[in-house]
Image (tube, helix red, strand yellow):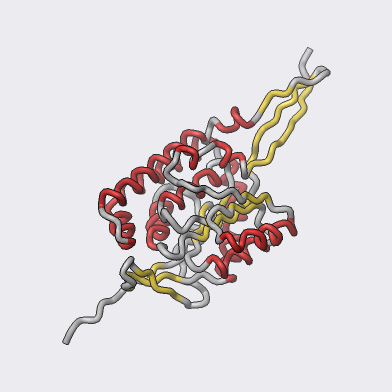
Amino acid sequence: MGRLDVRKTHKLYIDGAFPRSESGRVFPAEDSNGQVVARMSQASRKDLRDAVRAARGAQPGWAGRTAYNRAQILYRVAEMVEDRREAFAAQLEVDGRDRAAVDAEIEASIDRLVWYAGWSDKFAQVLGNLNPVAGPFFNISVPEATGVIGVAAPEEPPLLGLVSVVAPVVVSGNTAIVVPSGRWPLTAVTFAEALATSDVPGGVVNLLTGFKDELLPWLAGHMDVNGLDLDGAPSDMVGALVDAGAENLKRTRTDRTDDWWAASAQSPYRIAAFTETKTVWHPKGR
């Protein structure tokens, strides 16, 4: 009698922990041949609310850390992705690519994390300014984190696309609720494991595997979410998501990235998309 394979059921990543969906639902992760290779927890509206609550609780402390410390932590994430190279490779290969193509994506993802880590203590100088004023005052503009950001990661490439949307959001002090690729969700779970072992505080990044057409409308309409990155949202949903986000004036990014491998896919302006400019007046001494 043949043995029945026991497929692993992966969990969500919320508040630094790995809970099952409160609904108990799962969906299959399939390879390029349609064979089931694992089961994924299917996040619900309740799971999303839990993730928003965790992100809100973590945001002040994360934004309050020094930029240098956030850079250290993001660099540590890159180190842990490197350390888990074999696990990522095995999961990326389910889409039918050869090992060389998979290794290229892993290396590009690590480089992108390091690139954004390097911007952590520099973007304020680029995006801020000492403004000339007609009076005995200093007038200084400084970018600050927007708050809690909902992120739709692209379907492909599953790892490079994921890190390319998460890193610029959190490097400035925002926290994130991320809906990763639904077609290739396995890498999101291993990325969550890298986050959990990289000194990233619980709640800074929350990953909800599931289906975008179910989760994104609730994320866009949630009144405690301050911004949306819809780069990876289905094109036919973007208009409705923007309208839902307008109810509480969410800062919403709708630009689409055509080539995640291009140099243009990483930019300090992706950081700027979810910062607010705070202007301070200070009298000059005599």
Question: Residue 80 location, x and y as percent?
Answer: 35, 47
Residue at x-position 49% and y-position 48%? 258
Q: Quadrant of the C terminus?
A: top right
Query: Horizontally, is 187 left or right of 154 in the view?
Result: left
Between 238 and 194, the one lying in front of the other is: 238
Residue at x-position 64% and y-position 52%? 227
Query: Horizontally, is 101 left or right of 19 in the view?
Result: left
Give the residue furthest to the left. 1
**Occupied quadrant, residue 270:** top right
Query: Horizontally, is 126 left or right of 140 in the view?
Result: left
Question: Residue 145 location, x and y as percent?
Answer: 63, 43
Between 263 and 78, the one lying in front of the other is: 263
Query: Horizontally, is 148 left or right of 73 in the view?
Result: right
Residue at x-position 47% and y-position 77%? 25
Question: Residue 149 location, x and y as percent?
Answer: 60, 52
Question: Residue 51 location, x and y as percent?
Answer: 56, 62
Give the residue furthest to the top. 286
Give the residue furthest to the right. 135
Image position of 131 with respect to 266: above or below: above
Q: Quadrant of the N terminus?
A: bottom left
Residue at x-position 51% and y-position 49%? 165
**Occupied quadrant, residue 152:** bottom right
How many numbered marks appear? 0
